[in-house]
Image: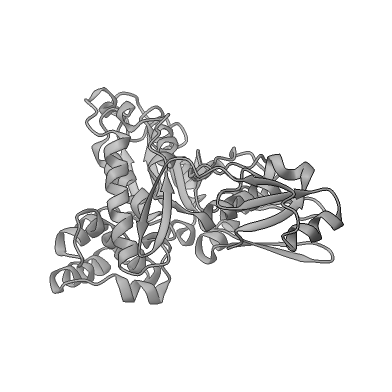
């Protein structure tokens, strides 16, 4: 990585935000040459250090903040959903939460951002490259992005394009962080089906008349939905007003290939919102950090949720009992090839959260418990 750079003097204020680099501001080419020959120092600015704490793993530094403006302690009850959220955060797994209005789905989604794994300097810089393409102010805090487009948003605003310059969209801006779809089935059919490619291939390709632009993006997809059009199908308080046909049509808006790309599915009940909350963001973040360390020390370049097929075979080691449980799960749930890989990845994260080097029976059972039922 570049440690020293010569830049226009008028750009010093904004560029000084970039951590880990010494800048020399000049007004002319002659001044730049003098700086390069060390005949002049120009206007020297040492950038500020990255905010927060850092941890060094296998010779690389990663940064994070212990700030929780939205804390999980505010989410009452929902023990199973918070457990699912913890697993999703630790491995950057895609997660779908289903429940009645007001049960806490959006609250959990918004709090996930602050307990995600730490970031390398390369990640921080890359996120800001995309932010600048989206005409947004750069921020070099080690906080991953949270993008939440409205369900009425157009396909170009979500995936990019819509202009001759192939403008960057929400999917690419979510790179390294969270893309949140609230009211998941209410997004247009074209948006929902187009989402399959970035979820699988981690890229968005925008075709213009004379060019093509590809944005690489690895994000954690978080979705929330009601169980039916009126929202009360699972309610123990209110009566569902939907017909069987209306519920079927509502469910069919989400295709099986799309849902198969989501690793964790959790159902939430509104009656739990009065229960005591016993899990806060700080303790959840500590668990995520410990699981992150295990993944990095194992030699993984990517977190569990983003492993490719070969990496799953390399890193998701199971004992014999876990393999037997998975085989029964394949037969019971009719798991696809992709579904099997996703289940292994979730089980790997559960094992990491428990400090286990090998996926055991209990880890696989819990992972299968978060699979979607047809």
Report the residue at 31% width, 65% height from top. Answer: 297
Colouring of the image: one colour
Left or right placement of residue 169 versus residue 177 in this view: right
Q: Quadrant of the N terminus?
A: bottom right
Report the residue at 42% width, 67% height from top. Answer: 301
Residue 191 visible within the image = no
Residue 97 visible within the image = yes
Q: Position of residue 48 (x, y in %)?
A: 56, 42
Left or right placement of residue 57 versus residue 17 in this view: left
Q: Position of residue 142 (x, y in %)?
A: 48, 45
Q: Where is residue 342, by image quadrant?
A: bottom left
Which of 22/182 is in front?
A: 22
Answer above or below: position of 369 versus 359. above
Q: Position of residue 84 (x, y in %)?
A: 30, 46
Q: Quadrant of the C terminus?
A: bottom left
Answer above or below: position of 206 versus 81. below
> Going by the picture, which residue comes out furthest to the front?
39
Report the residue at 42% width, 56% height from top. Answer: 61
Q: Where is residue 214, by image quadrant?
A: bottom right
Q: Position of residue 291 (x, y in %)?
A: 29, 55
Which of 17/354 is in front?
A: 17
Which of 337/203 is in front?
A: 203
Report the residue at 51% width, 43% height from top. Answer: 181
Answer above or below: position of 337 versus 61. below
């Amino acid at each position: 990585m570049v440690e020293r750079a010569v830049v226009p003097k008028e750009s010093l204020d904004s560029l000084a935000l970039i951590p880990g680099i010494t800048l020399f501001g000049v007004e002319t080419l002659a001044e730049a040459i003098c700086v390069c020959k060390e005949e002049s120092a120009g206007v020297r600015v040492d950038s500020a250090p990255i905010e927060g704490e850092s941890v060094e793993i296998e010779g690389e530094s990663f940064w994070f903040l212990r700030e929780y403006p939205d804390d999980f302690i505010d989410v009452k009850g929902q023990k199973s959903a918070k457990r699912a959220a913890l697993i999703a955060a630790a491995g950057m797994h895609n997660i779908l939460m289903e429940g009645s209005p007001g049960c806490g789905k959006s609250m959990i989604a918004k709090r996930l951002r602050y307990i995600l794994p730490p970031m390398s300097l390369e990640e921080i810089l890359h996120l800001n490259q995309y932010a600048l393409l989206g005409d947004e102010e750069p921020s070099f805090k080690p906080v991953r992005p949270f993008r939440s487009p409205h369900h009425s948003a157009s396909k170009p605003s979500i995936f990019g394009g819509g202009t001759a310059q192939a403008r960057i969209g929400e999917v690419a801006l979510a790179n390294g962080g969270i893309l949140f779809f609230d009211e998941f089935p209410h997004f247009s059919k074209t948006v929902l089906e187009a989402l399959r490619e970035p979820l699988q291939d981690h890229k968005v390709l925008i075709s213009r008349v004379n060019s093509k632009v590809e944005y690489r993006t690895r994000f954690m997809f978080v979705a929330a939905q009601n169980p039916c059009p009126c929202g009360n199908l699972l309610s123990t308080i209110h009566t569902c007003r939907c017909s069987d046909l209306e519920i079927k049509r509502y469910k069919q808006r989400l295709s099986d290939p799309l849902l198969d790309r989501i690793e964790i599915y959790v159902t939430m009940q509104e009656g739990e919102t009065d229960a005591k909350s016993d899990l806060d963001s700080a303790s959840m973040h500590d668990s995520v950090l410990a699981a992150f360390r295990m993944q990095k020390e194992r030699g993984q370049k990517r977190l569990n949720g983003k492993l490719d097929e070969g990496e799953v075979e390399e890193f998701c080691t199971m004992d014999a009992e876990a393999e037997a449980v998975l085989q029964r799960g394949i037969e019971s749930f009719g798991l696809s090839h992709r579904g099997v890989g996703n289940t292994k990845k979730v089980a790997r994260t559960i094992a990491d959260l428990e400090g286990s080097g090998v996926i055991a029976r209990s880890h696989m059972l819990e992972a299968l418990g978060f699979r979607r039922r047809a």
